[in-house]
Image (cartoon, rainbow, N blue to C red):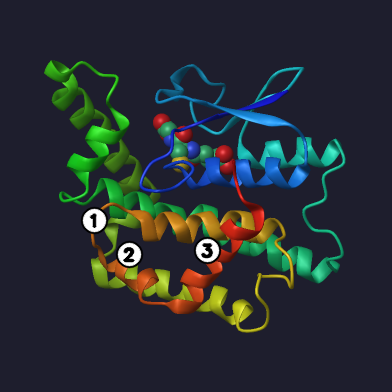
Amino acid sequence: MLTLLTFPSAFGQFSASPFCVKAAYMLQLSKQPWQRSDLLDPRKMPHRKLPVLRTPERLMPDSDAIRSWLEAQGAEFDAGLSDVQKGQSRALIRMAEDHLYFHIVMDRWGNDEVWPVLRDTFFTTIPTLIRKPVSNSIRKSVLKGLDMQGVSRFSETERLDRVERDLQAISAFLWQSPFLMGEAPTSADLSVGPMLAAMRATPAETPLTRRIDGDKMLCDYIDRIDQTIRLP
Ligand SMILES: N[C@@H](CCC(=O)N[C@@H](CS)C(=O)NCC(=O)O)C(=O)O
């Protein structure tokens, strides 16, 4: 059986990581038998990140590579889409994973109100006595990554404006149909949906959680994906 190595459930989600939720959705849609195995420390994984899929041959890191592997086994995530829709889908995926994602990381790791919750959710395996210094140093390195990526160099107003434009682009598709590319979930939904869900699930009220919570169309969309795919 296939095993999805994933960060544990948190904040009411299958996983705290939207990439792990994406991988779980893909596995569920692929109809292959699979199980989850929870990890808190990805350092021994091939890319030192999760999700990773354990296939009969090897450990497969990266949700995009997992997608390609499942497609090679016969899964079709974009059945019936035109080439233009597939192109739009690719662009939406990159927008979610390479832009919105960093705003979520910023909203979680850069926020002093959220931080204690993260520390006590993600670092429970670190002995209590050294948990604070170890987790503080991990936080520092995540914030350094956000600085290198650039997202933390914007003011909060600028960040919200950038997110807003993406949310409006997503909403333009959702005015047309229940899922981004039509009547059923396709690959774009499997990336965009978990990213919006993660944005909503951050365990403190932030401008981003408020933005999603106050948007009925986006909330209905997040819930629709969950109710359609139904993770175990
Ligand atoms: N490109 C990867 C991204 C996965 C990713 O960024 N995972 C994060 C969690 S959301 C992670 O494992 N971070 C741990 C780390 O960087 O140390 C994918 O699509 O699977």
SS class, disc 3: helix
Task: Specify few, some or many for label 1: CA neighbours under 10 Å numbering under 14, 14-19, or 20 or more.
Answer: some
**Residue under label 1:** 204
In x, y percent, where is residue 199? 39, 58
Cβ of mark 2 under 8 Å from ligand 1: the answer is no
Question: Compared with residue 139, is residue 47 higher up or lower down, i.e. above or below?
Answer: above
Tag 1: residue type? Answer: Ala
Taking the image as shown, residue 232 lies to the left or right of residue 115, namely right
The local secondary structure at tag 1 comes to loop
Q: Which of marks 2 and 1 is nearer the N terminus?
A: 1
Residue drawn at x 53%, y 21% as measured from the top left: 45
Q: Residues within 10 Å of mark 2 (few under 14, many from 20)?
A: many
Residue 152 x/y as whole percent = 29, 55
Q: Indicate left or right for 49 with 190 as reference.
A: left
The amino acid type of the residue labelled 3 equals Asp
Q: How far apart are marks 3 and 2 (CA)?
A: 15 Å
Q: Do the residues labelled 3 and 1 touch (CB within 8 Å)?
A: no
> What residue is at 27 percent from the left and 42 percent from the top?
143
User: In the image shown, does 108 or 10 lie closer to the viewer?
Assistant: 10
Query: Circle 3 sits on which residue?
Result: 223
Q: How far apart are marks 2 and 1 (CA)?
A: 8 Å
Question: In screen coordinates, is 155 left or right of 96?
Answer: left
With respect to residue 69, does 21 lie above or below? Answer: below
3 or 2: mark nearer the eye: 3
CA separation, marks 3 and 1?
20 Å
Cβ atoms at labels 2 and 1 below 8 Å apart: yes
Residue nearest the viewer, comparing 119 with 142: 119
Which comes sooner in the sequence, label 3 or label 2? 2
Task: Name the disc covering residue 209, or none.
Answer: 2
**Image quarter of residue 103:** bottom left
Q: Earlier in the sequence, mark 3 or mark 1?
A: 1
